[in-house]
Image (cartoon, helix red, strand yellow):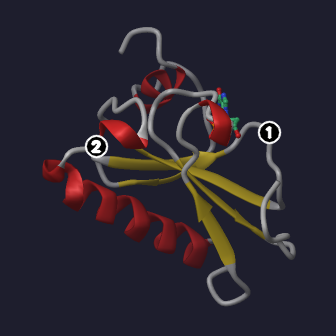
């Protein structure tokens, strides 16, 4: 999508600190980190929200989580712990409508989230 900020990051048109890229799934640092480690893991293909996933996307969802595990390991937080979150639509606070998984780590994370 031409006006999607994460599509532009995936295309290299907007800079980002990249952490992982396997051609289908990309991870980069969040521009506004809420924890010492805050990465975003996205599919390269534009999918607006979790609601827009279909059964054909099951493998892609698995790839998002495997990429998250890889990023957590690479950044040294796999053992100390991390949280993955996908916000869907308004009440969850989704502001970028390109599916993305947050990976937060590096401090004790409160529960339940606000
Ligand atoms: P959400 O509220 O789940 O839609 O989270 C969107 C996240 O995207 C938010 O934590 C800030 C991040 N973000 C927004 N614009 C940019 C950007 O241009 N670059 C990077 N790296 N992150 C961005």
User: Would the CB of label 1 be found within 8 Å of ligand 1?
Assistant: yes
Q: Tag 2's secondary structure? A: loop
Whether residues under marks 1 and 2 lie with C-beta atoms below 8 angstroms apart, the answer is no
Name the residue rendered at 67%, 74% in the picture: 82
The residue nearer to you, when weighing 41 against 51, is: 51
- Position of 43 with respect to 83 (left or right) is left
Q: CA distance from mark 1 to mark 2?
A: 26 Å
> Where does the C terminus fall, quadrant-wise?
bottom right
Q: Tag 1's secondary structure? A: loop
Residue 53, numbered circle: 2
The residue nearer to you, when weighing 83 against 43, is: 83
Name the residue rendered at 40%, 29% in the picture: 48
Image quarter for ligand 1 equals: top right
Name the residue rendered at 31%, 36% in the picture: 52
Residue 22 can be seen, yes or no: yes
Q: Is residue 79 above or below residue 73?
A: below
Q: Is residue 38 above or below residue 75?
A: above
Q: Residue furthest front?
A: 91
Q: Residues within 10 Å of mark 2 (few under 14, many from 20)?
A: some
Nearer the camera: disc 1 or disc 2: 2
Where is residue 91, by image quadrant? top right
Name the residue rendered at 47%, 21% in the picture: 8
Q: Residue furthest bottom?
A: 79
The residue nearer to you, when weighing 39 against 23, is: 39
On the image, the x and y values in percent for residue 31 come to 74, 37
- Position of 100 with respect to 37 (left or right) is left
Disc 1 target residue: 32
- Position of 75 with respect to 66 (left or right) is right
Q: Is residue 22 above or below residue 13?
A: below
> Where does the N terminus fall, quadrant-wise?
top left
Where is residue 37, by image quadrant? bottom right
On the image, the x and y values in percent for residue 68 come to 50, 66
């Amino acid at each position: 999508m031409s006006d999607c900020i994460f599509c532009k990051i995936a295309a290299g048109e907007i800079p980002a600190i990249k952490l992982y890229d396997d051609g289908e799934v990309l991870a980069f640092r969040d521009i506004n980190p809420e924890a010492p480690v805050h990465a975003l893991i996205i599919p390269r293909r534009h999918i607006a929200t979790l609601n827009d996933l279909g059964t054909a996307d099951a493998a892609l969802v698995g790839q998002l989580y495997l990429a998250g595990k890889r990023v957590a390991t690479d950044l040294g937080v796999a053992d100390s712990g991390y949280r993955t979150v996908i916000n869907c639509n308004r009440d969850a606070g989704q502001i970028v409508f390109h599916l993305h998984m947050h990976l937060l780590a590096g401090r004790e994370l409160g529960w339940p989230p606000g």
